[in-house]
Image (tube, rainbow, N blue to C red):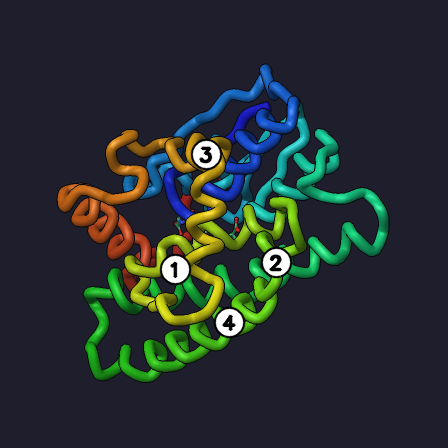
Amino acid sequence: MRLLTAPTPNGWKVSIMVEELREAGHPLADLEVHYVNIMKGEQFEPAFTRVGPNQKIPALADGDFCLMESCAILEYLADKFPSRLLPQTLEARFEVLQWVYWQAANVGPVFGNKLSYTRYMDDVDPAAKAHPLERFATEAQRLMGVLSRRLAGRDYVCGDELTLADIALYPWVRGWKWSKIPIPGIPHLEDWVERVRARPGVGRGLAYGVPKAEIDQWSEARKAQVAASGSKIAATENLDGREPGVE
Ligand SMILES: N[C@@H](CCC(=O)N[C@@H](CS)C(=O)NCC(=O)O)C(=O)O
């Protein structure tokens, strides 16, 4: 299998999954990890586009079978390598999957947009950014309220065990300072972030593409590099009406 990824929240979902599967006894010995430099636009190259037609990381090739979308990759790996990360019985499975889809449809896009408007869209007039910023900030807080209520009385999103639901949500929520979506004071969230972070598999997953010393605290140089790359990706003239990378 080939995982095409980069050190970003959607990339970390899959690297954490890989490492948690290893913790669960699946060695994934044939897995090759390829880092895609999204700052340089490698996601638009034909070699990437063949595996991930949406031209965004992560993407997975298992032999000739290609898969895009981080949460689809989580589900595929969970089915291919059964473990407690995704229960097999119908209701227990969908109890987990509903939170995975909730992440994909809500937390990912809302946090991603809030982050883009907060940190990256340098080329947009502040007055034009004010309304979307306010809207995504308010919605992000509402979503964190939903997660907080769900975590009341539970160590993890679906009970006593870490599942795909935590793996999908954690990389976005842990970045609350960078996206300026405050979670201190919202019950249960900081404890959950700490609990998930303390797992050895999660620690190893977060280290993909990041120097060990910067897993939890980026250097100023890295912050500047990420901001510059984010600005380039989020720039309004970015695609210029072209379809780069398509053969
Ligand atoms: N819904 C997609 C989102 C993927 C995504 O937005 N990836 C970002 C990095 S977190 C990316 O590749 N950005 C590069 C670009 O937009 O050109 C998923 O969950 O896989």
Q: Earlier in the sequence, mark 2 or mark 1?
A: 2
Cα gap from disc 1 to disc 3, whole angstroms: 36 Å
Does any portion of residue 107 appear in the rendered image? Answer: yes
Residue drawn at (67%, 41%) of the image? 85
Give the residue at mark 4.
143
Please state which amino acid type lies under the numbered disc 1. Gly
Q: Earlier in the sequence, mark 4 or mark 3?
A: 4
Count neighbours of disc 3 (C-alpha within 10 A) and say few if under 14, some if 14 to 19, many if 20 or more. many
Count neighbours of disc 1 (C-alpha within 10 A) and say few if under 14, some if 14 to 19, many if 20 or more. few
Decide which of 108, 184 is in the foreground and name it.
184
In the image, which is nearer the foreground, mark 2 or mark 3? Answer: 2
Image: 100 above or below 107 = above
Quadrant into which the N terminus falls: top right
Q: Quadrant of residue 27?
A: top right
Please state which amino acid type lies under the numbered disc 2. Arg
Q: In what element is the residue under mark 3? A: helix
Q: Quadrant of residue 173?
A: bottom left
Q: Earlier in the sequence, mark 4 or mark 1?
A: 4
Q: Position of residue 107 (x, y in %)?
A: 50, 63
